[in-house]
Image: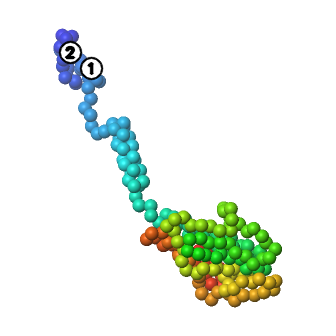
Amino acid sequence: MVGRIASLPCGRLAGNGKSVAACSGRRRSRGFSLIEIVAVLVLIGIVAVVALNKSDNSGIQAFAEADALRAALRYAQARAMADVYTWGISLSGSSYQLVEDNPSVANVVLPGQTSATRTLPAGVSLSGDTLILFDWRGRPVTAHISSVGGASVAAAANQTITVTESATAQTVSITAYTGLIP
């Protein structure tokens, strides 16, 4: 009878009236195991990373250079507010430069640069206003103040500069009268 008990299906009674409990090795599988779920999630993550890396990154330099230009303008504005002379940024198509009218200041350098000039990467260009000046109040002005006690007229209109890379353009604006650079 002992030989018969091993061959009985799970839950049946053996000839002696006791149930067979030797069924722990056989289980019906329902759903997925934790290892299978983790493996699928890892594969989905790898596919997502590959897809994101292949996405179009055009215009990234325009965003970065527009932020760097805003920082340079704010720096020139802060320096002008600590001085009686005008400070500003002079722009060309592929670079910009920190300018100042204080005769006692020499060798001005843009923060993060080794000189007063920042040259843009290839493919990035500037257009719009070519000279942005700030007075001791931090407001944009229309002309240089090159003597102590000199004055200049506040800019009556917003000044704008466009930073362009391929089809992406970022606008940097300087608000008239207040000098706000959003």
Point out residue 162 in the picture as x, y percentages from the top left corner.
Answer: 53, 76
Which of the 4 quarters of the picture holds residue 70? bottom right
Point out residue 165 in the picture as x, y percentages from the top left corner.
Answer: 48, 69
76 left or right, relative to 54:
right
Amino acid type assigned to the residue bearing label 1 in the image: Ala
Which of the 4 quarters of the picture holds residue 17? top left
Amino acid type assigned to the residue bearing label 2 in the image: Ile
Circle 1 SS class? loop
Circle 2 SS class? helix
Point out residue 101 in the picture as x, y percentages from the top left corner.
Answer: 75, 78
Image quadrant occupied by the N terminus? top left
Q: Are marks 1 and 2 in contact (CB under 8 Å)?
A: yes
User: Toward the viewer: 80 or 30?
Assistant: 80
Image quadrant occupied by the C terminus? bottom right
User: Toward the viewer: 165 or 149?
Assistant: 165
Q: Which residue is mark 1?
A: 22
- Reading the chain from its start, which is encountered first: label 1 or label 2? 2
Q: Which residue is mark 2?
A: 5
What residue sits 68% from the left and 72% below the top? 98
The reply to whether residue 167 is in sight is yes
